[in-house]
Image (cartoon, rainbow, N blue to C red):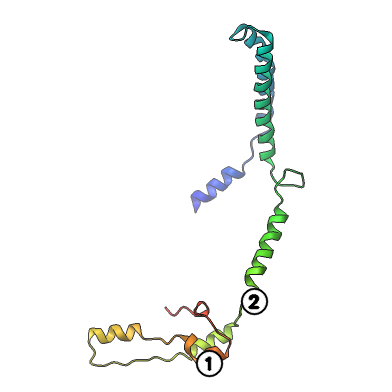
Amino acid sequence: VVDYKHLLELASTPLPAPLVSMGRTFLFIWTFSMPLVLRQGPFTDFWTAEVFLFFLTYGFVGLELVSMKLEAPFGDGVHDIRVSAIRDAAVVGMEQDLEGMDYQTIDQRRLAFSQQHIKGGIGDGGANDQAKQDKDKYVDPASTSEYRAMGGHDHHDMIPWD
């Protein structure tokens, strides 16, 4: 739990603004100084160097724009994550899941629990007798008429007995 808390602190700590600003400045200086390096390096043709520089600039500036978008992914923009739409979809899904379910109050569940009957008895007191008694100790409340009268239907409505 402590490690998870530390991870959340690390993930929620923003990068310092001067560091981000310096990184962007150096990216643009490096990108726009590349023609000077490419002219003396592998590209002797001017147009080949310009085409390479275009794709290089397109890639690095595109990555920078994506990183800027990932810094603040929530909002009302076209490409932002709509948290309100996710919330509304979750609420609609839960309402559809709960639609038509049979609910019981705690008093009804207590009544079903109190009306259980212990069946079986102690015979000769052997180990098999004790195991049978443990196995058959409680009656399934769904099989009792009182439970059905309260509206209980399925085994998933049962109270856990152990």
> Mark 2 packing: few (<14 Cα in 10 Å), some, or many (20+)?
few
Where residue 124 sits: x, y (%)? 23, 92
**Of helix, strand and loop, which one carries label 2?**
loop
x and y percentages locating residue 31 in the rendered image? 67, 19
* Closer-to-camera residue (113/102): 102
Q: CA distance from mark 1 to mark 2?
A: 22 Å
Residue drawn at the location 69% of the way across and 23% of the way down: 25
Within the image, what quadrant is residue 32 found in?
top right
Dot 1 and dot 2 residues touching (CB under 8 Å): no
139 to the left or right of 14: left
In the foreground, 12 or 115: 115
Q: Amino acid at mark 2?
A: Gly
Reading the image, the residue beneath label 1 is: 146
Could you tell me residue 16's position as x and y percent? 65, 34
Foreground residue among 25 and 135 = 135
Quadrant (top left, top right, bottom left, bottom right) of the C terminus: bottom left
> Left or right: where does residue 102 sit relative to residue 87?
left
Q: Position of residue 100 (x, y in %)?
A: 64, 76
Of callouts 1 and 2, which one flags the residue occurring earlier in the amino acid sequence? 2
Residue 100 — which label? 2
Around disc 1, counting alpha carbons within 10 Å, would you say few (fewer than 14), some (14 to 19), or many (20 or more)?
Answer: some
Q: Quadrant of residue 128?
A: bottom left
* Residue at 76 percent of width and 44 percent of height: 78
Residue 26 seen by the camera: no
Is the residue 145 above or below the residue 82 in the image?
Answer: below
The residue shown at (26%, 87%) is: 129
